[in-house]
Amino acid sequence: MYSLLFCKHLTHDRVKVFGDLQHAVEKAIQRYMVEQMTEKIAGLQQRATMYRMKYNMEPVVFELGTRFCRLGIL
């Protein structure tokens, strides 16, 4: 378990009253990671929408077009 259990005032019995600390921390980390991924996806979707509006094409098509131009293919 976590270092909190090694504090001299927190014994295993006292912490046990709050439930399984390991499970609670794992769930909290999982929720945090899902929230972070959701925010990242929303930001990327917003960016893709801006590309669509500005260039009237999908971002992937825009990206490939600019790469081909750099290579002198287009």
Image (cartoon, helix red, strand yellow):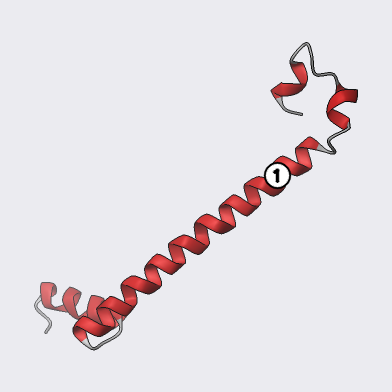
Residue at 32 percent of width and 71 percent of height: 47
Q: Position of residue 51 (x, y in %)?
A: 26, 78
Q: Position of residue 49 (x, y in %)?
A: 32, 79
Viewer-nearest residue: 74 or 57: 57
- Residue placed under numbered mark 1 in the picture: 26
Q: Is residue 44 above or below residue 25?
A: below
Q: Is residue 17 left or right of residue 65?
A: right
Q: Quadrant of residue 42?
A: bottom left
Q: Position of residue 18 (x, y in %)?
A: 83, 35
Residue at 77 percent of width and 21 percent of height: 5
Q: Is residue 32 left or right of residue 55?
A: right
* On-image quarter of the N terminus: top right
Residue at 17 percent of width and 76 percent of height: 66
Q: Residue furthest top?
A: 8
Q: Is residue 70 left or right of residue 46?
A: left
Viewer-nearest residue: 59 or 69: 59
The crowd level at tag 1 (other Cα within 10 Å; few <14, some 14-19, many 20+) is few
Count the marks: how many?
Answer: 1
Q: Is residue 17 left or right of residue 42?
A: right
* On-image quarter of the C terminus: bottom left
Q: Amino acid at mark 1?
A: Glu
Residue at 27 percent of width and 77 percent of height: 50
Please tell me whether mark 1 sits on a helix, a strand or a loop.
helix
Q: Is residue 40 above or below residue 60?
A: above
Q: Quadrant of residue 8?
A: top right
Q: Quadrant of residue 70?
A: bottom left
Q: Position of residue 10 (x, y in %)?
A: 80, 18
Q: Residue furthest bottom?
A: 56
Viewer-nearest residue: 53 or 2: 53
